[in-house]
């Protein structure tokens, strides 16, 4: 049985896309957390400032939290603490068959986002927010 709340966490922010020469370009983005998917966070990029061309990445909330303190992640998503001339940041490296991107995000923004997400679903309590019957039904429906 799910105990998920209807509240979500949505924070609009600006990330910096880091070029190979370390020049940066501001990119509008938003961070999203929904207790209905308690293990995941979603980062949505709005490259033209609208929803028309948005690109979304989902990954582990715990990966984001660990990345505040130490390098973490393997493969497609990696996160680590990063100090820049603009202050304390977090690096978010994304890889796909279409290419790689490195983003710089304010550490304070990530901390605020995670604080709010953990207030909705405390760390270690994610399983109690998953409706196992509904998830099983989805899996079985996908097989047919």
Image (cartoon, rainbow, N blue to C red):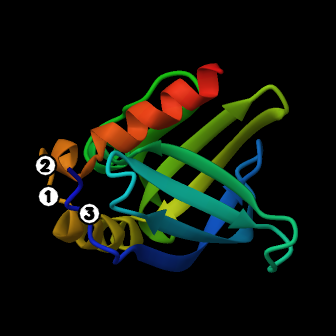
Residue 112 sits in quarter: bottom left
Q: Secondary structure at mark 3?
A: loop
| Drawn side of residue 61 relative to residue 98, left or right | left
Position of 128 relative to 78 (above/below): below
Which circle's residue, 1 or 3, is located before the other in the chain? 3
Residue 85 seen from this side: no
Percent of width and height locating residue 85: 51, 66
Which circle's residue, 3 or 2, is located before the other in the chain? 3
Percent of width and height locating residue 58: 54, 46
Residue at x-position 26% and y-position 73%: 116
Q: Secondary structure at mark 1?
A: loop
Q: Which mark is residue 4?
A: 3
Percent of width and height locating residue 15: 61, 67
The residue that mark 2 highlights is 125
Q: Which mark is residue 74?
A: none
The residue that mark 1 highlights is 122
Position of 25 relative to 59 (above/below): below
């Amino acid at each position: 049985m799910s105990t998920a709340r209807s509240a979500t966490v949505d924070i609009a922010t600006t990330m910096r896309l880091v070029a190979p020469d370390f020049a940066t370009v501001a990119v509008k983005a938003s961070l999203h957390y929904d207790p209905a998917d308690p293990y995941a966070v979603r980062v949505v990029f709005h490259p033209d400032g609208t929803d028309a061309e948005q690109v979304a990445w989902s990954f582990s909330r715990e990966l984001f939290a660990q990345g505040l303190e130490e390098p973490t992640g393997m493969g497609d998503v990696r996160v680590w603490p990063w100090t820049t001339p603009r202050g304390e940041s977090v690096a978010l490296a994304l890889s796909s068959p279409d290419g790689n991107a490195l983003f710089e995000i304010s550490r304070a923004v990530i901390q605020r986002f995670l604080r709010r997400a953990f207030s909705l679903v405390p760390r270690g309590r994610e399983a109690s927010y998953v409706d196992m019957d509904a998830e099983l039904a989805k899996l079985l429906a996908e097989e047919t």
